[in-house]
Amino acid sequence: MAAPKHHNPGFLALVNDAKSRIREIDIAGYQRMRASGQPHLLVDIREESEWAAGHAAGAMHLGKGIIERDIETKAPDKDKTLVLYCGGGFRSALSADALQKMGYRNVISLDGGWRGYQASGLPVEK
């Protein structure tokens, strides 16, 4: 598993601001959500190269650069539970905040992101 990245202070301030308005779930919470059968759409917002190297089984790919543009076509139901993940939970927090501003009511950012997902042993695809 790759080490967490070092982030610049301005980026962290932006992420922390977004995190003050969004819901997050940790890996254990996400495992419980899956086990309970709670309907949700898992959305990988990482870059195309990250997605191609491996991703959560059953996830939809909508990179951070296009998610706001394409989400309404791919997930038109604004009440559907969306679980967003990136590498570690920073970009997904920013995207969750943006989607909430677009009217999505059940957006959750996966804290720990892809690194935590992989470490948990949940199924992956390439």
Image (cartoon, grey):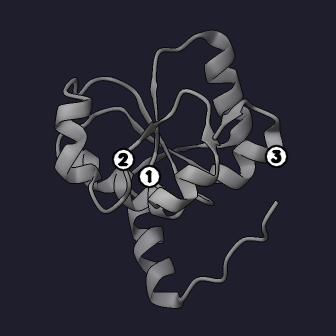
**Residue type (three-letter) at the residue carrying disc 3:** Ala
User: What is the x, y in percent for residue 87?
Assistant: 60, 59
Residue 62 has which mark?
2
**Residue type (three-letter) at the residue carrying disc 2:** Leu
Among numbered discs 3 and 2, the one appearing first in the sequence: 2
Work out whether residue 45 can be spotted: yes
Question: CA gap, disc 1 to disc 3?
Answer: 19 Å
Relative vertical location of residue 34 with respect to residue 3 in this rendering, above or below: above
**Image quadrant assignment for residue 103:** top left
User: What is the x, y in percent for residue 67?
Assistant: 29, 51
* Neighbours of disc 2 within 10 Å: few (<14), some (14-19), many (20+): many
Single out the residue that lies furthest toward the bottom: 9
Residue under pointer 3: 119
Horizontally, residue 102 falls left or right of residue 54, namely left
Say what secondary structure mark 1 lies in: loop
Picture residue at 64% right of the left edge, 11% below the top: 36
Work out whether residue 86 can be spotted: no
- Circles 1 and 2, Cβ within 8 Å, touching? The answer is yes
Relative vertical location of residue 11 with respect to residue 38 in this rendering, above or below: below
Question: CA gap, disc 1 to disc 2?
Answer: 5 Å
User: What is the x, y in percent for residue 123?
Assistant: 72, 30
Question: CA gap, disc 3 to disc 2?
Answer: 22 Å
Horizontally, residue 89 falls left or right of residue 94, namely right
Picture residue at 36% right of the left edge, 47% below the top: 62
Single out the residue that lies furthest toward the top: 37
**Residue type (three-letter) at the residue carrying disc 1:** Ile
Residue 94 has which mark?
none
- Numbered label tally: 3
Name the quadrant of the C terminus.
top right
Name the quadrant of the N terminus.
bottom right
Residue 45 has which mark?
1
* Neighbours of disc 1 within 10 Å: few (<14), some (14-19), many (20+): many
